[in-house]
Image (spheres, grey):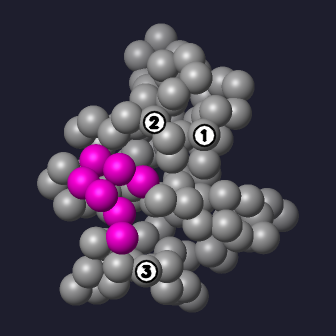
């Protein structure tokens, strides 16, 4: 895999997110309370809400528009809601973060 550097884990607040702009669209990179890092497309499968502005809890994020809960691990909507967003592999090397953009490019083809 081709890993692209996106910054340091300290750039993302605990239970928060930051966005990375790519040619394939915005990627939301989340940091959980347990210091785990996940990356998913930054749009809710429901109405396209900005997931990066949602509330992070455990390994999920709640969309700020209509309260859909999305798994950060799988990208799937939880509960009775249906839909999903793509997940992007993240590598954490001693706090330096990298994402595999090629996974997005492959999915777009």
Could you tell me if residue 11 is visible in this image? yes
Q: From mark 1 to mark 3, how far is it between C-alphas?
A: 21 Å
Contact (Cβ within 8 Å) of mark 2 with mark 1? yes
Circle 3 packing at 10 Å, graded few (<14), some (14-19), many (20+), is few
Task: Give the SS element for disc 1.
Answer: loop
SS at mark 2 in the image: loop
Residue 82: image location, x then y, percent:
58, 21
The residue pinned by badge 2 equals 54
Q: Is residue 91 visible?
A: no
Is 77 magenta? The answer is no
How crowded pointer 2 is (Cα within 10 Å; few <14, some 14-19, many 20+) is rated as many
Name the side, left or right, on which 30 lies relative to 101. left
Q: Which residue is mark 3?
A: 7
Picture coordinates of residue 108, whole percent (x, y): 79, 60
Residue 52 image position (x, y, % from top left): 51, 46
**CA distance for labels 2 and 3:** 21 Å
Part of the protein shown in magenta: 11-17
Q: CA distance from mark 2 to mark 1?
A: 7 Å
Residue 66, compared with residue 21, is above or below; it is above
Front residue of 4 and 18? 18
Could you tell whether 24 is left or right of 2 in the image?
Answer: right
- What residue do we see at 66% from left, 76% from top? 102
Pointer 1 residue: 50
């Amino acid at each position: 895999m081709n890993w692209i550097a996106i910054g340091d884990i300290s750039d993302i607040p605990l239970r928060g997110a930051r966005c990375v702009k790519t040619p394939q669209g915005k990627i939301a990179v989340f940091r959980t309370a347990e210091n785990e890092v996940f990356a998913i497309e930054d749009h809710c499968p429901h109405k396209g809400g900005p997931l990066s502005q949602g509330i992070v809890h455990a390994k999920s994020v709640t969309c700020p528009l209509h309260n859909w809960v999305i798994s950060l691990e799988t990208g799937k909507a939880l509960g009775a809601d249906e839909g999903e967003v793509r997940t992007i592999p993240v590598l954490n090397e001693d706090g330096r973060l990298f994402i595999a953009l090629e996974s997005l490019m492959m999915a777009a083809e």
